[in-house]
Amino acid sequence: MTRTPATLVLNDGTSFEGFAAGHLPDRGFTTGEFVFNTALSGYQEVITDPSYAGQIVAFTYPHIGNYGVTPLDDEAKHPWCRGVVVRDLSSVPSNWRSVGSLEDFLRHHRIAAIVGIDTRRLTRHLRSHGALPGAFGHGPHHTVVDAARRAVGTDGLDFVATVSTPDPYTRGDGDLHVVAFDYGIKTTMVDQLAQRFTVTVVPSRTTADEVRSLRPDGVFLSNGPGDPAALGANVRVLGQLLGSVPIFGICLGHQLLAAALGATTYKLPFGHHGSNHPVQDLATGRIEITAQNHNYAVREGSLHRGVVSHVNLNDGVIEGIASAPDRCFSVQYHPEAGPGPHDARYLFERFESLLRTGVLEAH
């Protein structure tokens, strides 16, 4: 296949040469914040995860697309990421579940890609300098450079309002009713909840009074994109619900719950994006291998209520919090694991136990 030459430029001036793939935007370039993901598989789930809104995903694994795509692996109706960076993009998918190639999938959803990039060099640069905004594209070099200089990251931006469902919907038929805030909820999260509960998924803008009117047994806070510090209104809603109903949060939901408990957040240099992060449960000493996708974290020592329940063994980042008096807990990682290991799916059982007994298991 003959491909059009393309350029990737970070806004610190670092550049890479490659070839255009996927959708070719009319303006000749795509902008966003570059982050790298270390997962060896699950590329479709990664690309369709709403938490990547505003970002361009660079895969560290060199060969992507070899098993094709299937609608069964979509985590949202369409991708929210700005673009994809790949070393080698397979043109011949081979898997019994496949209904097409990754490149056709990207074209269908108008997602630009750049291939042939030295992703090892790009990853090392992002590790050293942090997640950086930039641009890539097949347009004239000076146009891509110009776009990279103007590109912005995710700091201070609310992407949640963009990715959240506009209308409530219901899944499952369990005897317990859970209201799930959609900050960018993944399909696998909804599936895990629907296996246990009747779930009403509501827009991120839903008020505390509207939640109470639904008479939930519990409230779930989903993952989502962007800077939690830009979501003050969402934090205030959670503050009004704290103590009146059990709450379980994941990823962005964890950060927002922590903020409602008095904590502050900060941006990690290059975030955690992958499926092999070791996390320790401080109460039991148990170590889980977890899937993660976040650029922000809860600041150590800032939690006013509750305790830290889990930590990342790579860098000590807070990975879980709990408050027994408020009947709430949350984790920074992804126990639904789409993609990733299933070590932490017990947390959904912990949530069910909390709803049935009213008591938060010891952490």
Image (spheres, rainbow, N blue to C red):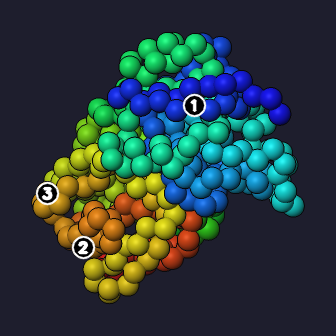
Looking at the picture, tell me which residue is in the foreground, 192 or 171: 192
- Find numbered disc 2 in the image and state the secondary structure of the residue it sits on: loop
- Find numbered disc 1 in the image and state the secondary structure of the residue it sits on: strand
Looking at the picture, tell me which residue is in the foreground, 183 or 212: 183
- Find numbered disc 3 in the image and state the secondary structure of the residue it sits on: loop
Q: Residue at x 37, y 73 (%)?
A: 279
**Disc 1 residue type (three-letter):** Glu
Labels 2, 3: front one: 3
Tag 2: Cα neighbours inside 10 Å, few (<14), some, or many (≥20)? some
Height in image: 257 above or below 324?
above
Labels 1, 3: front one: 1
Height in image: 361 above or below 198?
below
Q: Distance between the residues labelled 2 and 3?
A: 18 Å
Q: Which residue is drawn at 63% across and 45% down?
A: 87
Query: Which of the marked residues, 2 or 3, is nearer the chain's N terminus?
Result: 3
- Residue 79 in sight from this viewpoint: no
Tag 3: Cα neighbours inside 10 Å, few (<14), some, or many (≥20)? some
Quadrant in which residue 206 is drawn = top left
Rendering coords of residue 2 (x, y %): 80, 29
Q: Determine which residue is flagged by label 2.
A: 324
Q: Determine which residue is flagged by label 1.
A: 17
Rendering coords of residue 228 (x, y %): 31, 43
**Disc 2 residue type (three-letter):** Ala
Name the quarter where the N terminus is drawn: top right
Q: Which residue is drawn at 38% across and 26% down?
A: 13
**Disc 3 residue type (three-letter):** Ser
Q: Determine which residue is flagged by label 3.
A: 302
